[in-house]
Image (cartoon, rainbow, N blue to C red):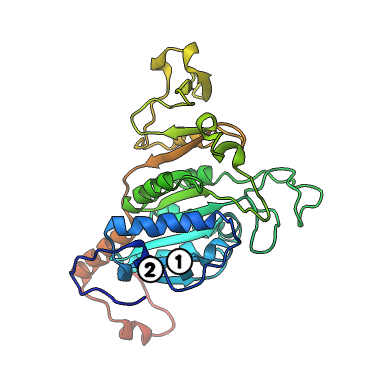
Amino acid sequence: MTDLAEPGAITQTTRKDWTSDQEVRWCPGCGDYSILAAVQMLLPELGVRRENTVFLSGIGCAARFPYYMNTYGLHSIHGRAPAIATGLAATRPDLDVWVVTGDGDSLSIGGNHLIHALRRNINITILLFNNQIYGLTKGQYSPTSEVAKVTKSTPFGSLERPFNPLSLALGAEATFVARTHDMDRKHMMETFRRAHDHRGASFVEIYQNCNVFNDGAFAQITGKDNRGEMLIPLVHGEPIRYGPEGEHGVVLRADGSISLVEVADVDESDLLVHDEHRDNPGLAFQLSRLSRGPFEPTPIGVFRDVERAEYGAEMARQIEETTARKGPGDLRDLLRSGSSWTVS
């Protein structure tokens, strides 16, 4: 990164300012290109500074992302980006910390780091590229691959039920949870904007195509001719409807379940009104499981956006209160105090 602005200066940037001099080395046609473009186009609109922005990643195709951003960044260890981001965000609240990860990186070896970053409500923005496959290692099945998926590592078909990333995030009590896809730049940019502006842990699942090892995994719902019938837009405060004419909808049944209906067959007042600020994540969890896979009508947008104390701020408050009560600690005395000590 070069040409840091003077402290306090108002910086106006363009996409070019956020683009590094590194050659982008993803397979031609990969969905990662459109996600990268959406982020590079959004950041100038946010009015943030390159020297205060950090992109962290683990291992995988998506993990090359920091190379292509003209910011600070770190290509870290497999699955560990949320842990590194936790330390950075908690100690440097002045930074915008983004985590770029994939379904294999964050939902397998990194699963534990992911759920604890979410439950602690660390002030980071997590973008999970979900292509339902291990692309970097040449096409093994991943934690989001469907049952019976035939790959190099499951020649007779996968036996495992896949993770639902949004359900996982909501189960971990993430305060911001959303879904978008790589075929709609406008939707991606607005979703990323909302995630960035949220104070606390933001989790965004991005349906992303791997045209080499899992081509067309989401085509039945994200294809241009299919979106109208297959994507269910979630808009806060509005009844959940979809279809070219809004002819389909979602209702909440008396037994607490939700289901798809034809709007003409019900009273319009029966349609479920989306409430992304609902504190209880139960209804958002049900919406995340409305589709059994990317071949049925699938909700897209912000599922949950609630306020909760952010970990870094609470840690700083705790330290400040303790220091005011007991005075500043002395690290040298602590290190020279012997092999054990008492914490009161």
**Residue type, numbered disc 2:** Leu
Q: Where 333 sits versus 314, above or below?
A: below
Q: Where 127 sits versus 250, above or below?
A: below
**Residue type, numbered disc 1:** Leu
Q: Which mark is residue 78?
A: none
Viewer-side residue, 108 vs 323? 108
Tell how many labels: 2
Say left or right for 213 vs 20. right
Q: Earlier in the sequence, mark 2 or mark 1?
A: 1
Residue 330 image point, x, y percent: 28, 81
The answer, for residue 85, to whether it is visible in the render is yes
Say left or right for 53 vs 134. left
Residue 14 image point, x, y percent: 32, 62
Q: Are marks 2 and 1 in contact (CB under 8 Å)?
A: yes
Crowding near pointer 2: few (<14 within 10 Å), some, many (20+)?
A: some
Which residue is denoted by mark 2 in the rendering? 88
Describe the element under mark 1 as helix, strand or loop. Answer: strand
